[in-house]
C-alpha cells in the first residue's frame, strides 16, 4: 500500500490542476455562465470503467489495484468540483447536493469498508459486479439520447479550451510527473493512462439533474471519447519517447 500512495498522490495533483484550470475558465470574458457550469467538469472528470479495464491490461492485478486507489482518492475531488459551479448557477444547496451525490457516497462507503476490512458476501459481490459492468453502456446510451453536436456551436471556444485541458495539458503533466517522481515504468504508464482518459459519461447525467445544458455536455462527452481513442496511445508513445 505504501508504494501505491505516491502514485495516488500524483493522480490527485493532476486532477486538482485540471479542476483549477477548468473552473478558472469561468472568468474568461464572454463565457456563458450556464455553459461553463455545465461543461467545466468534462475537463477533469474521467471514465472510471475504462480506467480499470485499461489498468488490468497495462499492469495486471497490481495495476488494477493501483488504478483503483487513484480513482478512490480522485472521485470525491472531481465530484466536489463538478457540483460546485452547477449548484451555484442553478441555486441548489451545495452541501445538500454533495450529500446526495451517489459517486461520493459510494466512494466514501467503499473506503470505509476497505479500511475496517469489511468484505461483501460472494453472491452479493457477483451481483454488484454485474450491475457495475452495465453502468458504462447505460451511461453512454444516456449521452447518445441527449447528443446534439450543434449544441457545441453555442460555445466553441469554451469547448476547445476544456478539451485541450482534458486531452493535452493533463497528459503532458502526467508524463512530466511520472519522469520527475521516478516511478517504475509500469506505474508511469498507469499515471499517463489515467491522465489521458476520456471524460466521464455521468457528466451528462449530473448536468441534466442540476439544470445544466445537457446537449452541450453530451457533445463534449462524445468528442472527448473520440479524442481519447487517439490521445491515449499518443500519450503513452510520448512517455516512451521521453523515457528514451
Image: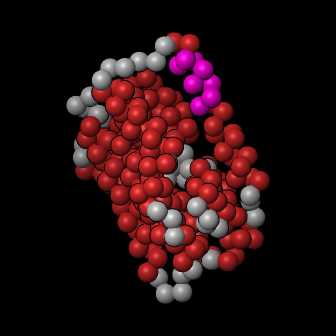
- Place residue 21 in its image quadrant: bottom left
Q: Count of labels shown?
A: 0
- Place residue 160 in its image quadrant: bottom right
The quadrant of the rendering that contains the N terminus is top left
Return the residue nearer the eye: 234 or 104: 104
- In the rendering, at what x and y percent does residue 169 appear? 43, 62
Instruction: From this view, report whether residue 17 is shown above or below residue 240.
Output: below
Q: Residue at x 74, y 58 (%)?
A: 146
- In the rendering, at what x and y percent does residue 61 appear? 43, 23
**Magenta span dominant secondary structure:** helix
- In the rendering, at what x and y percent does residue 64 appear? 44, 29
Q: How is the image coloured?
A: secondary structure
Horizontal side of 164 relative to 113 (left or right) equals right
Q: Which residues are magenta?
A: 124-132
Q: Residue at x 55, y 53 (%)?
A: 199
Does residue 172 appear in the picture of this structure? no
234 falls in the magenta region = no
- Place residue 50 in its image quadrant: top right
Amino acid at each position: 500500500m505504501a508504494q501505491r500512495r505516491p502514485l495516488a498522490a500524483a493522480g490527485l495533483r493532476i486532477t486538482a490542476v485540471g479542476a483549477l484550470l477548468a473552473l478558472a475558465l469561468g472568468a474568461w470574458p464572454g463565457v456563458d455562465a450556464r455553459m461553463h457550469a455545465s461543461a467545466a467538469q468534462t475537463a477533469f472528470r474521467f471514465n472510471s470503467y475504462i480506467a480499470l479495464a485499461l489498468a488490468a491490461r497495462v499492469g495486471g492485478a497490481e495495476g488494477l489495484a493501483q488504478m483503483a486507489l487513484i480513482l478512490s482518492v480522485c472521485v470525491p475531488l472531481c465530484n466536489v468540483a463538478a457540483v460546485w459551479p452547477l449548484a451555484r448557477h442553478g441555486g441548489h444547496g451545495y452541501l445538500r447536493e454533495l450529500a446526495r451525490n451517489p459517486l461520493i457516497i459510494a466512494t466514501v462507503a467503499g473506503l470505509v469498508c476497505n479500511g475496517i476490512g469489511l468484505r461483501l458476501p460472494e453472491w452479493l459481490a457477483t451481483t454488484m459486479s454485474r450491475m457495475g459492468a452495465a453502468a458504462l453502456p447505460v451511461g453512454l446510451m444516456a449521452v447518445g439520447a441527449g447528443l446534439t453536436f450543434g449544441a457545441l456551436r453555442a460555445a466553441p471556444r469554451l469547448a476547445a479550451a476544456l478539451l485541450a485541458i482534458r486531452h493535452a495539458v493533463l497528459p503532458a503533466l502526467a508524463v512530466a510527473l511520472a519522469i520527475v517522481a521516478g516511478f517504475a515504468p509500469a506505474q508511469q504508464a498507469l499515471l499517463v493512462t489515467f491522465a489521458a482518459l476520456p471524460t466521464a459519461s455521468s457528466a451528462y447525467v449530473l448536468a441534466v439533474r442540476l439544470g445544466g445544458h445537457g446537449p452541450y455536455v453530451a457533445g463534449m462527452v462524445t468528442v472527448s471519447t473520440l479524442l481519447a481513442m487517439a490521445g491515449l496511445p499518443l500519450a503513452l508513445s510520448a512517455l516512451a519517447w521521453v523515457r528514451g
